[in-house]
């Protein structure tokens, strides 16, 4: 009887241990199942370092890198050529060469954007954004040939042409598919300085906008029913108030939208729209430049402006380049952090949400690269495109310190250490692609009221290193101005 009781107790203990083990496993899984918006660590946590590993060089003014749902990298060269990097080599035969169609004499003109249909493996269809020989913005569709590494140059179908008279700048140039499988198109305000065409706030004009159209399965395109502007306006318009959107992206985990928009002469900005915000957003230009009011003779649209989540003055850069949220498997501590940079200064920042719609931003690198774009591969690893002729992959290490603590607070903070894995290629000498025209005095501190500050750095001139103060700022994407 005693033996029987002992055996029964052992069975109970074993059962309890099994239950506790299952509960512990479930709790551990729940702890690891963090929301996509919450990065594992802020990007300037002590112990995190960053580098940029050379992937490929010998390129001619590259302006974009992306993937087609497989391991290849597709690299866009401004003159009108798309190259493939595959299995460690740059293929000698271009994927597409449309230099005969592309005008690239202006520093902001050229073949600027590339997007593959989400089901490209089945359809073989992709889209390009370029300035044609008249200087107009052109969106065209092509098909791949029987050779998966060569497009059919004779398969072009014109999707949309946007007139761009009299100016060679502010062409925009980003195209990409959203989580809704619609094609989004970032268009500049038409060029010049100060929005001379009053296009950005005009819902009857495609310039200075983010467009959204349905192209999958279409001969050209249809307009999604959830676009809010009517046929008497321009129903393709999804959002207004952009100056020269230079690189945008969707967070592949959340569907949130990020847009880098090049400033006039005082502020560079990055805009944020959470998934589900919908059509009809006004990002402010030309009534606001970043968080600063801007004065011209253009009428406002009547749509309340949505301020950027981050903006910075001319002591830190002259031409923002929008980036991506890191979702790759190699550096899980970076998950959820958004990386962006500046073409003129070579600085790279990372932003993270401290609460929904509220961001902190930290500089993580000060490079010698002319950052014409960022990109991501099929796995979500991030790349930096150097206009001087190279593509680099973002790398990171993390050595956890048991005593290290971090509190996100506004104001200057020590610059995180970065040790490049390769010697940076010297900065390119050509005129920057998405240049700005400085006409205003910048303020080094984000505010809704203009304040005096030193004169802006002119395009083509790098700010002196002594002028740099590491940027740790907090912004809310809720309207505040």
Image (cartoon, helix red, strand yellow):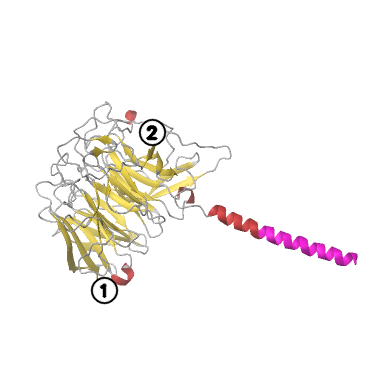
Nearer-N-terminus badge (1/2): 1
Q: Nearer the viewer, residue 26 or 48?
A: 26
Does 133 sit left or right of 50 as displayed? left
* Distance from the alpha carbon under mark 1 to that under mark 2: 51 Å
Q: Is residue 266 left or right of residue 46?
A: left
Q: Are marks 1 and 2 in contact (CB under 8 Å)?
A: no
Q: Nearer the viewer, mark 1 or mark 2?
A: 2
Q: Is residue 93 visible?
A: no
Mark 2 Cα within 10 Å, few/some/many (few <14, many 20+)?
some
Residue 222 seen in the figure: yes
Q: Is residue 365 magenta?
A: no
Depth order, front residue of 202/257: 202
Question: Residue 211: x percent and y percent?
Answer: 24, 55
- Up the image or down, 233 lies above or below 435; here it is below
Name the residue: 73% across, 63% down: 15
Quadrant of the rendered structure where residue 79 is?
A: bottom left
Query: Residue 221: x percent and y percent?
Result: 21, 65
The magenta-colored residue range is: 1-21
Q: Which residue is mark 1?
A: 146
Q: Which mark is residue 253?
A: none
Residue 328 position, x and y percent, is 43, 55
Quadrant where the image shows the C terminus: top left
Q: Is residue 4 magenta?
A: yes
Q: Residue furthest right?
A: 1
Q: Which residue is mark 2?
A: 470
Q: Residues within 10 Å of mark 1 (few under 14, many from 20)?
A: few
Q: What x and y, as percent, mark residue 470? A: 38, 33
């Amino acid at each position: 009887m005693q033996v029987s009781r002992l055996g029964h107790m052992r069975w109970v203990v074993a059962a309890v241990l099994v239950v506790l083990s299952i509960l512990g496993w479930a709790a551990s899984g729940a702890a690891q199942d963090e929301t996509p918006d919450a990065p594992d660590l802020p990007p300037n946590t002590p112990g995190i370092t960053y580098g940029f590993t050379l992937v490929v060089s010998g390129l001619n003014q590259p302006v974009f890198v992306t993937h087609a749902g497989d391991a290849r990298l597709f690299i866009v060269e401004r003159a009108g050529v798309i190259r493939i990097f595959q299995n460690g080599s740059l293929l000698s035969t271009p994927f597409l060469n449309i230099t005969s169609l592309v005008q690239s004499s202006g520093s902001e003109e050229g073949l600027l954007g590339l997007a593959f249909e989400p089901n490209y493996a089945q359809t073989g269809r992709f889209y390009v954004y370029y300035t044609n020989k008249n200087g107009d913005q052109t969106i065209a569709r092509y098909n791949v040939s029987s050779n998966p590494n060569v497009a059919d140059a004779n398969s072009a179908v014109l999707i949309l042409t946007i007139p761009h008279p009299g100016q060679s700048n502010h062409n925009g140039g980003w195209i990409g598919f959203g989580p809704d499988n619609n094609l989004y198109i970032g268009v500049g305000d038409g060029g010049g300085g100060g929005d001379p065409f009053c296009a950005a706030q005009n819902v009857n004009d495609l310039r200075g906008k983010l467009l959204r159209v349905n192209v999958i399965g279409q001969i050209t395109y249809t307009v999604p029913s959830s676009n809010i502007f009517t046929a008497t306006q321009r129903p393709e318009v999804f959002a207004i108030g952009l100056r020269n959107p230079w690189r945008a992206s969707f967070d592949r985990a959340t569907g949130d939208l990020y847009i880098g928009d090049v400033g006039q002469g005082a502020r560079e900005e990055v805009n944020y729209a959470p998934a589900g915000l919908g059509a009809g957003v006004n990002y402010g230009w030309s009534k606001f430049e970043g968080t600063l009011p801007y004065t011209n003779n253009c009428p406002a649209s009547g749509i309340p402006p949505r301020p950027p989540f981050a903006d910075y003055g001319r002591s830190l850069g002259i031409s923002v380049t929008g980036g991506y949220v890191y979702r790759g498997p190699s550096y899980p501590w970076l998950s959820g952090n958004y990386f962006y940079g500046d073409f003129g200064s070579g600085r790279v920042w990372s932003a993270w949400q401290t609460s929904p719609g509220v961001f902190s931003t930290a500089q993580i690198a000060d490079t010698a690269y002319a950052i014409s774009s960022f990109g991501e591969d099929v796995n979500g690893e991030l790349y930096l495109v150097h206009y001087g002729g190279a593509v680099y992959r973002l790398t990171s290490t993390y050595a956890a310190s048991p005593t290290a603590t971090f509190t996100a607070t506004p104001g200057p903070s020590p610059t995180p250490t970065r040790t490049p894995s390769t010697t940076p290629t010297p900065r390119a000498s050509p005129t920057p692609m998405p240049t700005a025209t400085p006409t205003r005095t910048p303020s080094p501190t984000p505010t809704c009221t203009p304040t005096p500050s030193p004169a802006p750095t002119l395009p083509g001139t790098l700010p002196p290193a002594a002028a740099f103060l590491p940027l740790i700022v907090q912004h809310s994407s809720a309207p505040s101005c």
